[in-house]
């Protein structure tokens, strides 16, 4: 048995047969749908299928059953297979029982009886999709762990080599850059995998549409009158213009409102869910000719597919732009200027490159504030070396805050200098440490966590640019300020 299995449980045979038929019709041949008439039978069936190596992404159970209740069953299942998604069907609104199931069975969702077929099918689709998405994420996380283990081995090797590196300043800068890249790889991999996953999912949706619906389009439009075709295109246009992403709560609210409106117009309210999904939930009066059409469900289904196609292209566009931005930032960071000459570069662009690479660390618990002055001039510099400065300052700030707090970056111009201030809300630096902080090999970190070269290299790079760096710190606010000349004094500018 290679196909995944969905288990349905209900002591009422009629209800059990109904839900089994609805799922089989909706899911086609991609899944097996097994049924059980009691909690005990369902538990036995679940154990048997699991022992036979079957994948069980979802179990749907009635709540009120003789013997083992649905809540007890799902709690037992959760102990055996916590990853399996659970849906509870209930005809009562006992919040205590539902909360108990939510707390002890990791309940995905509950649906009140009698259930709405459309709501049930969409809930099942969402649950199964989330299950396999979680499985994919777990596989990717395992792969990243292997990468991290390899990186850790490499980092250990680099730390041993670092003790012997006392050659040129440039060699130290590049070694520090490699160590920083090693620290960023896991986050960068995650950042790239996220848009790639979105692109892959969207391409699959487009492919599914082309396989299943493209040939039906001519017949579909032929079946519509000229007037109904115009109504259809108006509906599509309004749906495409709807950019707002609705929460689940908002969808339920709009669905309830639409249901009432459709009932008032004597229209089958089962189409309310489709209308909400395609973004039609306000001013439905202009669409009454379509909604009252005998083939309204077919028309709305086609509209839903076309809107999904358009949303998939938008997703691909946004995701590809995000991936391209990350790759460009990584390329900009990793470049090495072998000419040995300063070039004119945008300081803010370099800072943004580093922030892009640190996006994964910044988005969890860090409030980022950026204050960039307008019309800042480009300055003569070594851009790759300055990128190492911004990387070190941002990295130290995140460590000082334990990756939770406020990071503020200010870039201003003053007296023919550009000032770059990096401020964090960490625990601060004592006066004693501040006096030694730019000394080579000085570190307050535990053994193996830092070489003590980071800020020494930062100072050497700033000195190379005829600039200065200062630090001011109190508890809850530490600011490193870099002063860089706008003109190169060595060229007489």
Image (cartoon, rainbow, N blue to C red):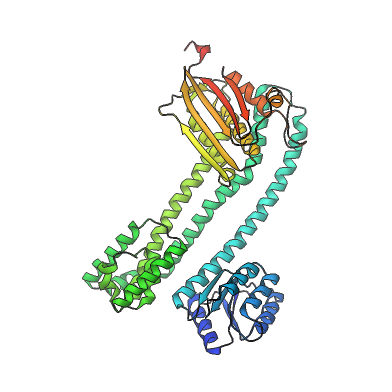
User: Within the image, what quadrant is residue 430 found in?
Assistant: top right
> Residue drawn at (60%, 47%), measured in percent from left and top?
189
Q: Judge left or right: residue 82 versus residue 363.
A: right
8 is higher (above) or lower (below) than 211: below
* Residue 243 placement (x, y as % from top left): 37, 55
Q: Residue visible at 65% across and 38% down?
A: 399
Question: Which is nearer the eye, 435 or 468?
Answer: 435
Residue 451 visible, this angle: yes
Above or below for 63 versus 359: below
Residue extending furthest toward the bottom: 13
Relative image position of residue 378 (x, y in whole percent): 46, 24
Q: Which image quarter is the N terminus in? A: bottom right
Q: Residue 383 at what x, y percent from top left?
A: 54, 27
The residue under the point 51% across, 13% down is 489
- Residue 331 appears anywhere in the view: no
Q: Relative to 43, does residue 342 appear above or below in the rendering?
A: above
Q: How many dots with numbers?
A: 0
Percent x, y of residue 228: 24, 71
On screen, residue 383 above or below 270: above
Nearer the observer, 151 or 420? 420
The answer to which image quadrant residue 154 occupies is top right
Say which of 74 and 431 sits in front.
Answer: 431
Q: Residue at x 49, y 46 (%)?
A: 322
In the picture as drawn, the residue positioned furthest to the top comes out as: 492
Say left or right for 219 vs 12: left
């Amino acid at each position: 048995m290679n196909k995944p299995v969905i288990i349905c449980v209900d002591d009422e045979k009629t209800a059990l047969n109904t839900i089994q038929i609805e799922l089989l019709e909706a899911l086609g041949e991609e899944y097996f749908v097994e049924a059980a008439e009691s909690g005990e039978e369902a538990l036995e069936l679940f154990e048997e299928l699991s022992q036979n190596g079957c994948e069980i992404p979802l179990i749907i159970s009635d709540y009120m059953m003789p013997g083992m209740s649905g809540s007890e069953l799902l709690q037992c299942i959760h102990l055996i297979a916590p990853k399996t998604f659970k849906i509870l069907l209930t005809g009562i609104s006992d919040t205590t029982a539902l909360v108990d199931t939510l707390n002890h069975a990791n309940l995905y969702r509950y649906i009140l009886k009698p259930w709405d077929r459309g709501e049930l099918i969409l809930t099942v689709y969402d649950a199964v999709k989330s299950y396999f998405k979680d499985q994919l994420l777990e596989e990717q996380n395992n792969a990243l762990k292997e990468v991290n283990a390899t990186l850790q081995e490499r980092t250990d090797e680099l730390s041993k080599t670092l003790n012997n590196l006392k050659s040129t300043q440039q060699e130290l800068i590049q070694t520090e850059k490699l160590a920083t890249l090693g620290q960023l790889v896991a986050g960068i991999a995650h950042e790239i995998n996220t848009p790639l996953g979105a692109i892959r999912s969207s391409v699959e949706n487009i492919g599914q549409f082309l396989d299943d619906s493209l040939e039906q389009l001519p017949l579909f439009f032929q079946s519509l009158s000229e007037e109904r075709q115009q109504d259809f295109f108006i509906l599509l246009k309004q749906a495409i213009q709807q950019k707002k992403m609705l929460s689940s709560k908002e969808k339920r609210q709009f669905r309830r409102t639409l249901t009432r409106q459709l009932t008032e117009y004597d229209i089958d309210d089962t189409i309310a869910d489709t209308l909400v999904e395609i973004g039609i939930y306000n001013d439905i009066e202009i669409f009454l000719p379509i909604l009252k059409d005998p083939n309204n469900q077919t028309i709305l289904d086609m509209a839903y597919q076309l809107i999904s196609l358009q949303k998939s292209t938008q997703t691909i566009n946004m995701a590809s732009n995000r991936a391209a931005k990350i790759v460009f930032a990584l390329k900009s960071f990793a470049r090495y200027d072998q000419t040995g000459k300063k070039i004119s570069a945008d300081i803010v662009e370099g800072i943004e490159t580093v922030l892009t690479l640190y996006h994964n660390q910044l988005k969890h618990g860090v409030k980022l504030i950026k204050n960039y002055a307008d019309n800042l001039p480009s300055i003569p510099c070594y851009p790759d070396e300055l990128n190492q400065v911004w990387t070190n300052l941002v990295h130290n700030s995140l460590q000082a805050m334990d990756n939770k707090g406020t990071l503020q970056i200010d870039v201003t111009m003053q007296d023919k200098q550009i000032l770059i201030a990096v401020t964090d809300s960490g625990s601060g630096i004592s006066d004693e440490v501040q006096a030694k902080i730019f000394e080579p090999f000085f570190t307050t970190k535990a053994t193996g966590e830092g070489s003590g070269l980071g800020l020494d290299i930062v100072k050497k790079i700033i000195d190379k640019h005829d600039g200065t760096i200062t630090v001011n710190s109190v508890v809850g606010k530490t600011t490193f300020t870099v002063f860089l000349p706008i003109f190169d004094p060595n060229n007489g500018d």
